[in-house]
Amino acid sequence: MARVLIVDDDAEFRGALLQVMRRLGHEAEAVADGQAAMTAQRSSPADVVFMDMFMPEHDGLESIRQFRRAFPEAAIIGMSGGGLMDRGTVLDIARQLGAARTLEKPFGREEARAALAAVLGERGTP
């Protein structure tokens, strides 16, 4: 079992992914932006962070930079459905900044499970 943090400003998407993670047997928490993610990570560190790229306040790219500096042990899975920048481009940048995996929204339960399993496998976490 891993501890998972979901960071997304879309409440419906955030709730759905939270349910998926819990049904897979993981301890999961969800927050609406990068600033709340930093606070959550300080109080209860996650093994894996699903990070949306386009959010108000702290966007995903800035949040990845901050997480890499403050919490280098946390694996990040970047997510994007597009926005001001092509989602492929922003996800490429996310990987360059340290995201272990990326997912294009919309994605399904199996894609989320596979990305999580891949990063946990790389870390040696069951």
Image: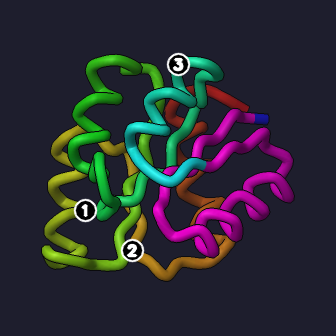
Is residue 25 located in the magenta-colored stretch of the structure? yes
Q: Give x and y (percent) for residue 19.
A: 78, 62
Residue bearing the label numbered 1? 91
Q: Are marks 1 and 3 in contact (CB under 8 Å)?
A: no
Q: Give x and y (percent) for residue 6.
A: 57, 50
Q: How many marks?
A: 3
- Seen in the picture, residue 111 relative to 4 is either above or below; the reply is below
Q: What kind of colouring is applied to the model shown?
A: rainbow
The local secondary structure at tag 3 comes to helix
Q: Give x and y (percent) for residue 125.
A: 66, 28
Q: Which residues are magenta?
A: 2-30
| Distance Cα–Cα, label 2 vs label 3 | 27 Å
Which one is nearer the viewer's eye here, 60 or 79? 60
Amino acid at the residue labelled 3 = Arg
The local secondary structure at tag 1 comes to helix
Residue bearing the label numbered 2? 104
Please state if 37 lies on the left or on the right of 29 as rendered. Answer: left
Amino acid at the residue labelled 1 = Leu
Residue at the (29%, 46%) spot, across then down: 58
Residue at the (63%, 74%) spot, across then down: 12
Which one is nearer the viewer's eye here, 27 or 39? 39
Which one is nearer the viewer's eye here, 98 or 56? 56
Residue bearing the label numbered 3? 42
- Seen in the picture, residue 113 relative to 83 is either above or below; the reply is above
Q: Are marks 1 and 2 in contact (CB under 8 Å)?
A: yes
| Distance Cα–Cα, label 1 vs label 3 | 25 Å
